Amino acid sequence: MDEQNNVRRVGRELKYKGAILDVYTDHMEFANGNKAEWDFIGHKGAAAVVPVTEDGRIIMVRQYRNALDRYTLEIPAGALNYVGEPGIRCAARELEEETGYRSDDLEWLITIRTTVAFCNEKIEVYAARNLQQSHQHLDEDEYVDVETYTVEELKEKIFGGEIEDSKTIASILAYDTKYNRK
């Protein structure tokens, strides 16, 4: 059986338009004649960065996350300014805005699709080296503490349950695998 013909979207209805995401109801039809409504969240995309200091420590940000009602420890990241903005441009901007460092040495690390069951969010992640001190440019509603850790300390926080953010977990482990396990 041709898997490509089993499911077909026949309509998409906007339910909510937000600053970062839009919420839709998708109307689906299946090869067997059944119909269903599926939730879909359209996201304009994001980028993140693993900033690496000269001594190999990773710069992290601690910030309040409303969805969890607590502070989290994460790699710097943010939404694209517009659909199609190059991820490397967004990653460089977020690096400086959130940490107060900048770099002209960003290398693609991985691409993450956060929740493929109902959202198209795509995060391009870069490793940044040769960091130069600058200053933070936080948004009016952003409060970010900058902290540094070794990769081993971060892995302990991941496997100890302190770090739960998926982009941070995937990115730290990918960085460790790519650069420390050669």
Image (cartoon, rainbow, N blue to C red):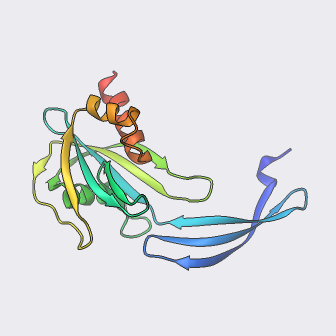
Q: Where is 77 relative to 53, above or below?
A: below
Task: Residue 35 in the image: state x and y as whole percent.
Answer: 83, 65
Image location of residue 145, percent across then percent down: 20, 54
Decide: is 173 above or below 164.
Answer: above
Q: Position of residue 128 (x, y in %)?
A: 24, 44
Q: Is residue 174 visible?
A: no
Relative to 123, is 75 on the left or the right?
Answer: left
Name the residue: 14% across, 32% down: 55
Between 45 and 160, the one lying in front of the other is 160
Residue that lies at the very extreme toward the right in this rendered image: 32
Q: Residue furthest left?
A: 133
Q: Quadrant of the C terminus?
A: top left
Q: Specify whether 49 is left or right of 129.
A: right
Q: Residue at x 70, y 69 (%)?
A: 26
Name the spot of residue 57 as percent of width and height, x first: 19, 36
**Residue drawn at the location 28% of the way across and 28% of the way down:** 152
Can residue 161 be seen here?
Answer: yes
Residue extending farthest front: 69
Q: In the rendered view of the protein, which quadrant contains the N terminus?
A: top right
Residue at horizontal 23 percent and vertical 54 percent from the top: 95
Q: Is residue 157 above or below residue 39?
A: above
